[in-house]
């Protein structure tokens, strides 16, 4: 069961880092302003948010497996549409299946693992997203260097998504029952006395706001780092693509490492330590004057961000009453898409005037994240 769950998040991550790598070449070949990259991210992410908020009803009616299958098929189809896009309108048409496909599988799998598996598996679930998010930029960097360009990269990634959809089709029956040992493993990680904090409390809404801040900072770095390196700092397209892959790779490796730490680190300690490291990375990237330092900064930033999303998600049953857990998780998933939609798009407008200022937007986002998590820990 677990390998199939992990594959679901690999498929979710595959498209996420691709636009940032492809956009410097894509906007030139299609004759589009560079700032429109933020608009595309905005549309895809808002549609993902709509799908995420609706995922509870979809999963209750159709079960998690079929939703993951259809979502993967939608994103694969959308990526193939991007590979053949002749203009901006075609890109917008591809945004619909790409957004709707991503949102449902994200919220569904987060809720599934939070209810049935331990924190180790939650971290490894999100490490699986990092595998996909690392693989996407690597494929784009390879096709750009090989001469097939962004169209070749999107064709390969879209084809891989459709192959994954066939895997999900062949394993649908595995979603019908959760192994008893997985339920028992998750239960041993819960506190002896269940918390009583309701969902409609200041802490409940602050937890959602934190996900908006976190994903806003991570997505802005992921979408605009390559453009900053290529356009503002003169780094080659291929090298900048590898730097973006290193950022997502650091998130992946960090989550695998936190998973191996197991019970030796609490969710709260892992999250707080990670945010502090991310702040160092964000500052270093904003100030870096060499490609080596910029790459090292992105690795530090990714490593620091690694435990934040899974740690905060898995901590929900330890902060809130049992009947509030799924409500809070749903809000957090939806709020994450709000953050991913708004700040990268706003940064697109800022990038029209100064790409370097976008790097400082990430620094401010990490500072706000640190303050908000500290406040949530005090409330719960």
Image (cartoon, grey):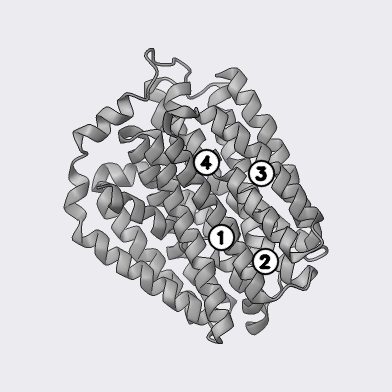
- In this view, the residue in front, 352 or 192, is 192
Where residue 42 appears, x then y in whole percent?
60, 58
Q: Residue at x 70, y 76 (%)?
A: 236
Q: Horizontal placement of 146 versus 359: left or right?
A: left
Q: Is residue 70 above or below residue 142?
A: above
Label annotation for residue 226: 2
Q: Horizontal placement of 117 versus 18: left or right?
A: left
- Mark 1 is surrounded, within 10 Å at the Cα level, by few (under 14), some (14 to 19) or many (20 or more) other residues, namely some
> Image quarter for residue 60?
top left
Mark 3 vs mark 1: in front: 3
**Distance between the Cα atoms at labels 3 and 4?**
13 Å
Where residue 356 appears, x then y in whole percent?
80, 60
Residue highlighted by disc 3: 278
Q: Residue at x 61, y 69 (%)?
A: 241
Where residue 213 appears, x then y in whole percent?
63, 41
Q: Residue at x 50, y 52 (%)?
A: 252
Disc 3 element: helix
Q: Earlier in the sequence, mark 2 or mark 1?
A: 1
Q: Earlier in the sequence, mark 2 or mark 3?
A: 2
- In this view, the residue in front, 378 or 102, is 378
Residue highlighted by disc 4: 309
Label annotation for residue 43: 1
Q: Earlier in the sequence, mark 3 or mark 1?
A: 1
Mark 2 vs mark 3: in front: 3
Where the C terminus falls, by quadrant? top right
Mark 4 vs mark 1: in front: 4
Disc 1 element: helix
**Distance between the Cα atoms at labels 2 and 1?**
20 Å
Image marks 2 and 1: residues in contact by CB distance under 8 Å = no
Q: Earlier in the sequence, mark 4 or mark 2?
A: 2
């Amino acid at each position: 069961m677990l390998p199939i769950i992990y594959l679901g998040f690999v498929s979710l991550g595959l498209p996420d880092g691709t636009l940032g790598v492809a956009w410097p070449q894509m906007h030139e070949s299609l004759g589009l302003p560079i700032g429109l990259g933020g608009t595309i991210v905005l549309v895809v992410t808002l549609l993902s948010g709509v799908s995420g908020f609706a995922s509870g009803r979809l999963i209750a009616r159709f079960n998690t497996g079929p939703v993951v299958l259809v979502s993967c098929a939608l994103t694969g189809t959308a990526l193939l549409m991007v590979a053949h896009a002749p203009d901006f309108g075609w890109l917008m048409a591809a945004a619909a299946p790409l957004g709707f496909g991503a949102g449902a599988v994200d919220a569904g799998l987060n809720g599934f693992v939070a209810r049935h598996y331990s924190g180790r598996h939650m971290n490894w679930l999100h490490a699986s997203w990092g595998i996909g998010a690392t693989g996407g930029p690597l494929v784009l960097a390879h096709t750009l260097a090989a001469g097939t360009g962004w169209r070749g990269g999107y064709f390969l990634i879209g084809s891989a998504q459709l192959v994954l959809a066939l895997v999900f089709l062949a394993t649908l029956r595995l979603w019908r029952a959760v192994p008893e040992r997985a339920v028992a493993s998750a239960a041993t990680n819960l506190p002896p006395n269940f918390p009583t904090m309701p969902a409609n409390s200041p802490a409940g809404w602050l937890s959602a706001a934190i996900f908006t801040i976190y994903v806003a900072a991570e997505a802005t770095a992921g979408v605009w780092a390559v453009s900053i390196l290529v356009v503002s700092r003169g780094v080659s397209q291929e090298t900048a693509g590898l730097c973006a892959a290193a950022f997502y790779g650091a998130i992946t490796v960090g989550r695998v490492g936190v998973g191996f730490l197991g019970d030796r680190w609490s969710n709260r300690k892992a999250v707080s330590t990670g945010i502090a490291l991310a702040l160092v990375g964000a500052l270093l990237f904003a100030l870096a004057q060499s490609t080596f330092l910029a790459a090292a900064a992105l690795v530090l930033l990714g490593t620091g961000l690694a435990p934040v999303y899974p740690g905060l998600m898995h901590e929900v049953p330890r902060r809130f009453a049992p009947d509030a857990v799924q409500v809070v998780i749903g809000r957090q998933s939806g709020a994450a898409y709000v953050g991913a939609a708004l700040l990268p798009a706003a940064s697109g407008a800022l990038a029209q005037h100064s790409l370097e200022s976008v790097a400082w937007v990430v620094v401010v986002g990490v500072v706000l994240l640190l303050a908000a998590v500290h406040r949530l820990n005090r409330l719960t």
